[in-house]
Image (spheres, grey):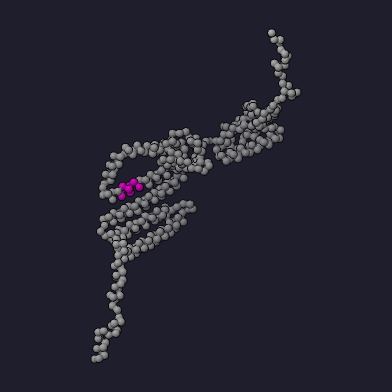
Amino acid sequence: MLTFAMAVAPGASGGEQSASPGAAMGPIRELLSREVFGYSVSTLALGALVILLVLAVNTAIRFGLRRRERREDAAEPEGERSALGFVVHCAQAPLRLLVWALAVRFFLGPLFAPEYGAEVEQIAAVLYSVAIALFIYRLVDIVEIFLLRYARRTDTKLDDMLVPAIRKTLKILVVIVVGLHVYESLSDEPVTTLLAGLGIGGLAFALASQDTLKNLFGFVMILLDRPFLVGERIVFAGHDGAVESVGFRTTRIRRLDGHQVSVPNAKAADDVIHNIGRRPFIKRIMNVTVTYDTPVDKVERAVQIVREILDHHEGMDPDLPPQVYFNELNADSLNIIAFYWFHPPDYWAYLDHAQRVNLELMRRFEAEGIEFAFPTQTLYLAGDPNRELVLKHLNANAAGPPSEA
């Protein structure tokens, strides 16, 4: 009995050494209940956990979709993109944004702003719309890829001008539709109200955008009239280069010196354009000058040499044979003019041919003893016995007739 009494007696040493679980959790509860920036530590910790989970899910989405994209593109020919791979690529950012929208709607909103449930739902709805719009906006590029593939199979380059315009138009429509939807979601007003307000200020907007409308009509005229196409070399407003792109507002030209020039479409549609890319040949006008002391027979021989060099030359069209004539008695030379036409109009091949013509001409003239002329002046002295200068009026008597007193 004594032993049992000692075991159950209150205040025994074993009971004093053991601590209750509630007493141990007291400091933790106190820490979690503390407020920081108006929120308890437990709420902030839970919010941080949700954010970490969202980041982890987004990381998994990014790596998983990139891996799938690479696998799909690897099955395509080199330089080509898989349609499914491109869709996966376009879905990466919208999916990550959608995860954030779900986190805001179901976790972060109720956790940090439970009294603003309607506002949180609006924010989430806007994020949903932006995510879907971003996916469609990026997916428009796949339309351009398929259209460009089709354009490569056609002979005309008009498709190369239309495809970028179609892509820009679709993207603008996506932005407008999403903007109207977001406006309707946030304002709780029908879109017709906004359109009516735009109608009131439509006149002022039209007056302010006259230049833009002119450039847009200029773009339409370029498409219809086709004074140039993408890739063709043109000379316009002092700029010589290849057309890179034709947009709604400007036409971009890559000049021969490497600079890019943007020309308003309204000006391109109204001004004079030299389309070098459509020339059927390259015409060369060559002036060969020989010295004045060249004998007549050697002048005739010089004309014959030029004709022999150009006879059935490389790139000659039988309908456009070369023409060579002794045409001018210049102030300091005898001039032989030659016309010939080089086909096709490949500029670098033309320069290579012109170099061969020039070198052959120099060799033939040197072998015949015919000298090229260069600008010179000849002075004749009065005392030169070979070229006597006679001044008849001064050769008379110096005294002249006697003068009358």
The reply to whether residue 277 is in sight is no
Q: Position of residue 24 (x, y in %)?
A: 30, 75
Q: Which residue shows up at 72% across the image and 23% down it?
A: 382
Q: Nearer the viewer, residue 298 or 14?
A: 14
Magenta residues (range): 174-182
Q: Quadrant of residue 346?
A: top right
* Quarter residue 286 falls in: top right
Residue 179 forms part of the magenta stretch: yes
Residue depicted at 45% across the width and 34% down the height: 271
Q: Is residue 303 left or right of residue 31?
A: right
Q: Residue at x 30, y 72 (%)?
A: 27
- Residue reaching furthest bottom? 1
Does the magenta-highlighted stretch encompass residue 185? no
- From the viewer's side, name the closer residue of 186 and 379: 379
Left or right: where does residue 70 sit relative to residue 354? left
Q: Position of residue 19 (x, y in %)?
A: 29, 79
Which quadrant does the N terminus fall into? Answer: bottom left
Measured as percent of width and height from the top left, residue 398 is found at 72, 15
> Which residue extends farthest top?
405
> Height in image: 8 above or below 245?
below
Prevalent SS, magenta region: helix
- Observer-nearest residue: 19 or 206? 19
Q: Quadrant of the C terminus?
A: top right
> What is the residue that sits farthest to the front in this orientation?
405
The answer to whether residue 226 is above or below residue 39 is above
Judge left or right: residue 114 versus residue 371.
left
Using the rendered image of the protein, determine whether residue 359 is visible from the camera's viewpoint: yes
In x, y percent, where is residue 100? Answer: 34, 58
Tally of marks = 0
On screen, residue 161 above or below 123: above
